[in-house]
Amino acid sequence: MRYMMIVKASRASESGVMPTEAQFAEMGAYNEQLAEAGVLVDLSGLKPTSKGAKICFSGGRRTLIEGPFVEDSNIVAGFWIIQVKSHQEAVDWAMKAPNPAFNDTEGEIELRPFYEPEDFASSAALDKAMELEFPGKRS
């Protein structure tokens, strides 16, 4: 089972405040634990929304909005992707994570499972899509 551990943005991360050396070390130690356990698939931090853009869809129209975006709880500051055997194992790893807000007192990590190929009934269109995402897993 693959899970994404989604790090929610904080005032500090949206302001571009970088972690201290000690905070980098703490996060690095956690990342090493994930890697050594063989569960780490990918991870990254994201720059503030002031460096990004979003595209909003309404019917057939697309609207480009350049950052920064209004601060809300839906802004993502980073993520880990882990491969685990159960939901409980994913929860256990998320509970071990350092507070991702660094300079703020309250941080948040959202834990979400990925859809996997076995979650879907087979069809020609789905098989083609799955081949792009999971080469060699479906025929």
Image: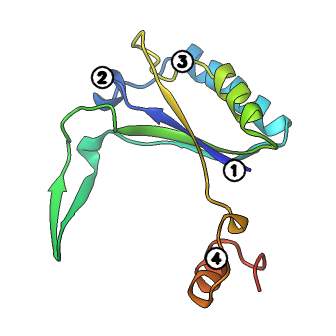
Among the two numbered marks 3 and 4 on one chain, the one whose residue lies closer to the N terminus? 3
Image quadrant occupied by the C terminus: bottom right
Closer-to-camera residue (89/123): 123
Instruction: Find disc 1 in the rendering and name its residue.
Output: 2
The local secondary structure at tag 3 comes to loop
Among the two numbered marks 4 and 1 on one chain, the one whose residue lies closer to the N terminus? 1
Residue depicted at 69% across the width and 50% down the height: 2
Q: Which residue lies furthest to the bottom in this view?
A: 124
Amino acid carrying mark 4 in the image: Met
The local secondary structure at tag 2 comes to helix
Contact (Cβ within 8 Å) of mark 1 with mark 3:
no
Mark 1 vs mark 2: in front: 1
Instruction: Find disc 4 in the rendering and name its residue.
Output: 130
Closer-to-camera residue (18/105): 105
Contact (Cβ within 8 Å) of mark 3 with mark 2:
no
At which x and y percent is residue 123?
63, 85
At which x and y percent is residue 136?
78, 79
